[in-house]
Image (cartoon, grey):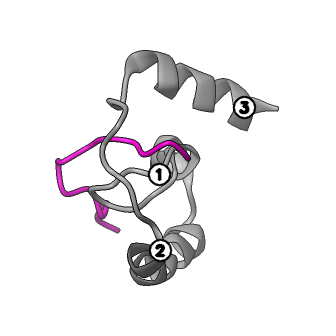
Amino acid sequence: MQSPCVARCGLNDDDYCMGCMRHIDEIVAWSQASDEQKQAIIAALSARREHLSGENSQSLSRAKWLEAEARLAK
């Protein structure tokens, strides 16, 4: 299943990408997620788009990526 990434990465203050609307944890876990998990993430994106506001206030940095990997490994 193709990633919903739109190559306009930037996190809001709650760590949601304002390009694709995924949370950093979902972005990091995407390659290991099952098709069912990916479908659930994609299903949530349109509702998130309506409710999330903010700007790309933080870049999707390597440090943020490593933080999410460590959190998901627990």
The stretch drawn in magenta includes residue 47: no
Give the x, y percent position of residue 15.
51, 43
Q: Which amino acid, mark 1?
A: Tyr
- The answer to which of 7 and 29 lies nearer the viewer is 7
The quarter of the displayed image where residue 9 is located: top left
Q: For mark 3, what is the residue? A: 71
The question of residue 7 being in magenta is answered with yes
Residue of label 2? 48
* Distance from the alpha carbon under mark 2 to that under mark 3: 22 Å
Q: Decide which of 47, 31 is in the foreground and name it.
A: 47
In percent of the image, x 32 and y 29: which residue is there? 59
Q: Which amino acid does label 2 sit on?
A: Arg
Q: Position of residue 37 (x, y in %)?
A: 59, 69
Q: In the image, what residue occupies the spot 48% across and 27% down?
A: 65
Which SS does the magenta portion mostly show? loop
Which residue corresponds to mark 1?
Answer: 16
Q: Which residue lies furthest to the front in this view?
A: 54
Judged from the image, the secondary structure of the residue bearing numbered disc 2 is helix
> Quick one: SS at disc 3?
helix
> Are there few (<14), some (14-19), or many (20+) residues within 10 Å of tag 2?
some
Point out the residue furthest to the top here. Answer: 63
Tell me whether the residue at label 1 lies in contact with that at label 3, contact meaning CB atoms closer than 8 angstroms.
no
Q: Answer yes or no: do the residues labelled 1 and 2 have beta carbons within 8 Å?
A: yes
